[in-house]
Amino acid sequence: MPTIPTEPAIQVAGLRKSYRSRSGDQLVLDDVDLVVPAGTVTALLGANGAGKTTTVGVLSTLLAPDAGTVRVAGHDVVREADAVRASIGVTGQVTAVDELLTGAENLRLMVRLAHLGRAEGRERVAELLERFALTDAADKPVSTYSGGMRRKLDLAMTLVSAPAVVFLDEPTTGLDPRSRRTLWDEVRALVAAGTTILLTTQYLEEADQLADQVAVLHGGRVVAQGTPDELKRVHDAGTLDDVFLALTEPAAATPAETTTTDQEAVR
Amino acid sequence: MTAVAIPPTHPTLRPRPVSDVLTMLGRSLLRAVRYPALTVFLVVGPLVMLVLLVYVFGGAFGAGVAPGVTPGADGRAAYLAFIAPTLLVITVVGGATSVATSAAMDAAGGIMARFRTMAISSGSVLSGMVLGFLVQALVAVVLVLGAAFAMGYRPDAGPSDWLALVGLLVLLGLALNWLCVAMGLHARSVESASNLPMVLLLLPFLGSGFVPVDTMPGPVRWFAEHQPFTPVIDTARGLLAGGAGLDGATVVQAVAWCVVIGVAGYVWARSLYRRERRL
């Protein structure tokens, strides 16, 4: 099915966000610009504390931006938060499942909150359990699940409402290689079905494998954005690891091809 | 066929408050069934107090609450009649302290953040919890009342008194549950979530719960007469006594306190739910 992108799924311009605390404000996102075309996977890379989770928080309506415009699925995250919420699914770093309920009960909770019909809901639950290889564990309490099973259930819960835009914040952190592959396959299947995905990751191989586009977050800005191959070429690097290291070095001695790195050099 | 990249918003994803609250209530009750220890704890606490206070202290205390009663068996019966209403109120308070822990658990785990990113009625998450624990508290109240009956408690309440008592306990439960949801969200950790609500469990002791307030020294008595639990307990006691010694002003005070606590708790809880948490 050919898709004609009318509006990017995610549009961020001049996003600024700081956390207020007693010891003063801490600026996390200075001036973030990001465009994610519909139906693609974008990987958001950055060192620990670079603001990846904060970015996802703003995009998923958990945090209010201090400045800038943020549109997700064609809606403004501040003025049309409910419309955004109706179009997104979020799997955060902290596993968001109810430990006391079984896997199937967790999924049924999502079905009811998505206001799906009874028959449609039952079908969706069975399909998701099957897809994530959780059918055998469906009626066991989540407290007995392994870390990988929890992660899978978490993602399955996110997908119950068939969201157009999915945010995955470090989805494979702590997963064994097999579970990681399962998740990658799932991401590919979602994109093939037209879903837009923004994922944050520490694993550059993951970005290389999955992402149509990579954005590197550093110093509160997106310092580079492009396909993995483009970034490797521009930075004359063999792997994304090298690109990442070059871009996120504390005193970045970066090549001056791109305007964003020019700004870095001026500082 | 022209395919658009962004599918139109699913029409069924609009918030539906009633449906969402019922879903969340269902979740809360299912959690109670899965983790019965919490409900058992709600019953066991007041039960231990009831047995201890009646069988150990009651024989001597009875004469203090019902002048002219001889110590011993008559004293125990008189004291049981005096404190049974108090323990029903304390059972409701116990339910509220559990709400705080539950709210703090949801906030600490990722599930509350998940709910906040979903197109659901924003009040439903906390309302479901408040109502779920109210149901648990009322079940516990019935069991505690049953134990009091087994110990020989025979209230003089008529049908309308019972109905009014249920209304009072429901109102008190809603008010305290909203306050405790807020306290639970305010707490920095799950472990400290029940610290603030514990103060609520002390208040019946600093009021008319276990001894008549006119036996207390000046400042303590003043506090006892002006805190919310005294009119609530006096109303419950009066209703169970079939209306004997119950004046309208006390009932009005009891209801007013519940409304004030409930509204304040609701407003506080809603603002804490919307508050940004650092990610």
Image (cartoon, coloured by chain):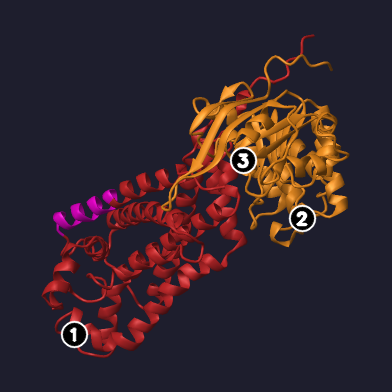
Res B179 quadrant in image: bottom left
Residue B30 appearing in the image: yes
What is the crowding at mark 3: few (fewer than 14 residues within 10 Å), some, or many (at least 20)?
Answer: many
User: What's the amino acid at mark 3?
Assistant: Gly
Choose mark 3 or mark 1, whichever is in front.
3
Q: Is residue A32 left or right of residue B190?
A: right
Q: Is the C-beta separation of discs 2 and 1 under 8 Å? A: no
For image coordinates 37% across by 47% down, the residue present is: B268
Chain B: what color? Answer: red
Kindly state the secondary structure of the residue where label 2 is placed. loop
Q: Which residues are magenta?
A: B247-260
For image coordinates 79% across by 46% down, the residue present is: A203
Kindly state the secondary structure of the residue where label 3 is placed. loop
Q: Which mark is residue B69?
A: 1
Q: Is residue A263 magenta?
A: no
Chain A: what color? Answer: orange
